[in-house]
Each structure stands twice: as C-alpha cells, then as structure tokens.
Amino acid sequence: MGLKLRELPATEEIFIDANIFLYSAFKHPVFGNKCKNFLIRIEKEEIKGYTSDFVLNEIFHKLMIAEIVKKFGIAAKQVVRFVKKKPEVIAELETVWTEMEIIKGFNISILNGSLFPDFIKISKMYWLMATDAFHVATMKKHGITNIATNDPDFERVNGTKVWKP
C-alpha cells in the first residue's frame, strides 16, 4: 500500500513529482484534494518541498497541452502541429499562466545542477525511464530521501520513501 502523503511528518523534506501538481491542477476525482492539501502543507511551511526545473517544465507542458485541447477542440496528439501552424494561439491561453503562478506562489525550493552521467547510472541500476532517473539523481545530489508521487517505479530505488496521495 505504501506511505500516505497526509501522514508525512511535519518538518520532513520531500521532492515533489509532476503528477502531484497535476492532480491538484486538474482536480483529479480521486487524488486532486489529497494533493491540494499536501501542497497547502508545504505553502504553510509544515513540510519543506523541493522540485526541479525539469518537473516544472513537464507540468507547464502538460497544462499547456490540456488547455489547447480544451480551448480549440483538438486531439492531444495534434497540439504540436496545431501550434506550429498557429503559434499565436499561445497568446490566447489563460489557465496555464494562472496555474503556473499558483505553483510559483508555493514555498517550494527549486533544485538544479549538472546530473550527467548520474541519471544514466540510476536508470540502469533501478530500471527507471529517463525522467524518473533524472528526478532520483536530483534527490540524491541534494540528500533528499522522500518523494511525493503516485508513480510506483520509485519504490525500486533503495533508500527512497515513496509518499502517495
């Protein structure tokens, strides 16, 4: 079953995966409120939250695609082609900017720095896809052992505590 985000002790440090932000932003019927409440705990400084530019870019990308799909009624797989033909549609977006401002307002520290070739070794060692290996490399570089995610793949990483919504 795993560890539950709501049970994460105060004062803990935790890396936040993209799905936590996205569940909250998209008001997921099962995980949305749980993730929102977790992010509020970080905003109130009960917990020290960390993420990376890589995660934030992933969130930004998915929010942008979702808004374009909704606003212009096209399939997600057609978004890139649609925007290439009509780049001015980016100026018509609203929700993506609002959601990114909300995230910017949380008390979350951004972790960065060179992680090559660490993420390659981690991918091989724990059988992780590239993005997940990058997240683990970021955590290891900064001494963070907790991760907020709904991705079970992180459970294969020795020394990592996976906290789920």
Image (tube, helix red, strand yellow):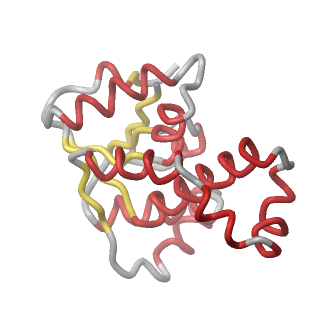
Q: Is 3 left or right of 104, judged from the image as shown?
A: right
Whether residue 58 is situated above or below residue 85 in the rendered picture: above
The number of numbered badges drawn on the structure is 0
Q: Position of residue 105 (x, y in %)?
A: 26, 47
Residue 51 at x, y percent in the picture? 36, 55
8 over 70 or under it: above or below: above
Residue visible at 46% across and 53% down?
97
Provide residue 65's location: percent of width, then percent of height: 68, 53
Between 90 and 19, the one lying in front of the other is 90
Can you tell which quarter of the image residue 28 is in?
top right
Q: Position of residue 165 (x, y in %)?
A: 46, 25
Tell me what residue is drawn at x 14 percent, y 37 percent: 45
Q: Is residue 6 above or below residue 58?
A: above
Query: Residue 138 appears in which quarter of the rendering?
Result: bottom left
Considering depth in this image, is 17 or 95 the residue closer to the camera?
A: 95
Residue at the image position 15 percent from the left and 31 percent from the top? 46
In this rendered view, identify the residue nearer to me: 25 or 58: 25
Find residue 42 and report its image quarter.
Answer: top left
Report the side of 52 relative to 149 (left or right).
Answer: left
Q: Which residue is drawn at the image coordinates 47% and 32% (left, top)?
A: 24
